[in-house]
Image (spheres, grey):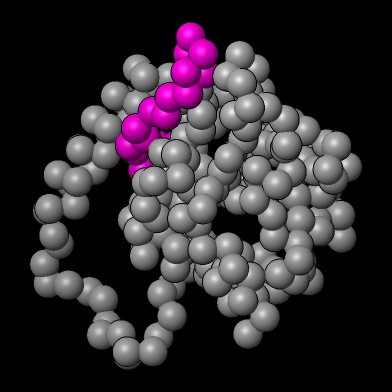
Amino acid sequence: MAKSGLVQIAMAAAASLLMAACVTPWPPTDTPKTADAPPPLTIDRLPADFVHNGGEPRSADTIDMIVIHTIGGPLCEAGEIRFAEIGGSAVFWRDWFLDQDDKSIHYVIGRDGAIAQQRPDLRTAGHVSFHGVRENVNRRSIGIELVNDGDGKDPFPPAQIEAVTALVKKLSADYGLGPEDVFSHSELDPRRLEGCGDNYRRVDPGPLFPMTDLKAALAD
Ligand SMILES: [Zn+2]
C-alpha cells in the first residue's frame, strides 16, 4: 500500500519523533498509576471544525462491524511478493490518509500505542473494496489501521495491542457490538493478488495479531 519513498519519509518521521521523545519534561506531571489501572484511551482527534471532504454522514445504528487492518500489505512485483517496511507514527499515517482520494480510515494506531482519528465514527470511510463477503462494508463499519509491515512476521508490540483492545472495547460499548462483529480485513476480501499466483490480495492483520484474545476481551 505504501510506496518506498513514503516509507523513507515515514521512517524519518519516526526518527524525529523518537528524538523529540528524549526531551522529557521535568518535573513529571503524571500521577502514579495503580498496578491494575487500564491504560488511558487517548485519541488524537482532528479539530471539531475540520471539514471532511470524503465519506458520508451516517447514524450510529448503521454501525455493526469493526475491521482491523495493517498499513503494510503484499506488493506484487514481477511475479514476486514483497512487503515494505512500515515506519511512522499514528499521526503521520492519519495525515497521509487525509491526502488520499481513494482510501480513508477511522483510526490509526502506532507501534507505541498512540491512536489518531482520521474520520469521525459517524462518517463513512473507504477501507474495504470487496463487498462479496459482507455487503456495504464501508457504510456499516469502523476501520482501524495498525502501523505494521503486514507480512505476518512483524510483531505487534504490547502497547499497540493494549491500545487496539481498549479502542475496540470502547467502540463496541458505544455501538452495541460483540466479538462476532470484529473482522480481519483478510476475511472480508478473498481475492487473489493479480500477477502473483495463488497469493491473496489482502492478508491483514495476519497470524501474529491476537484476534482471539481481542474478541475474548469484548466478552468480559
Ligand atoms: Zn486492510
Residue 71 image position (x, y, % from top left): 49, 37
Q: Quadrant of residue 148?
A: top left
Q: Is residue 159 above or below residue 204?
A: below
Asked if residue 198 is among those painted magenta in the image, a careful observer would answer: no
Q: Is residue 154 left or right of residue 185?
A: left
Say whether residue 33 is visible: yes
Residue 119 image position (x, y, % from top left): 63, 43
Q: Is residue 204 left or right of residue 19?
A: right
Work out which residue is located at the far front of the displayed protein and give it: 198
Residue at 66 percent across and 65 percent down: it is 171
Residue at 19 percent across and 46 percent down: it is 18
Q: Is residue 140 left or right of residue 220?
A: right
Residue 117 image position (x, y, % from top left): 55, 48
Q: In the image shown, does 170 or 32 lie closer to the viewer?
A: 170
Q: Is residue 122 above or below residue 202?
A: below
Q: In the image shown, does 182 or 154 lie closer to the viewer?
A: 154
Q: Is residue 107 above or below residue 105?
A: below
Residue at 63 percent across and 27 percent down: it is 198
Q: Quadrant of residue 194?
A: top right
Image quadrant containing the C terminus:
bottom right
Residue 20 image position (x, y, % from top left): 18, 46
Q: Is residue 39 left or right of residue 196?
A: left
Residue at 59 percent across and 68 percent down: it is 212
Asked if residue 92 is among those painted magenta in the image, a careful observer would answer: yes
Q: Quadrant of residue 83?
A: top left
Which region is colored magenta?
Answer: 76-93
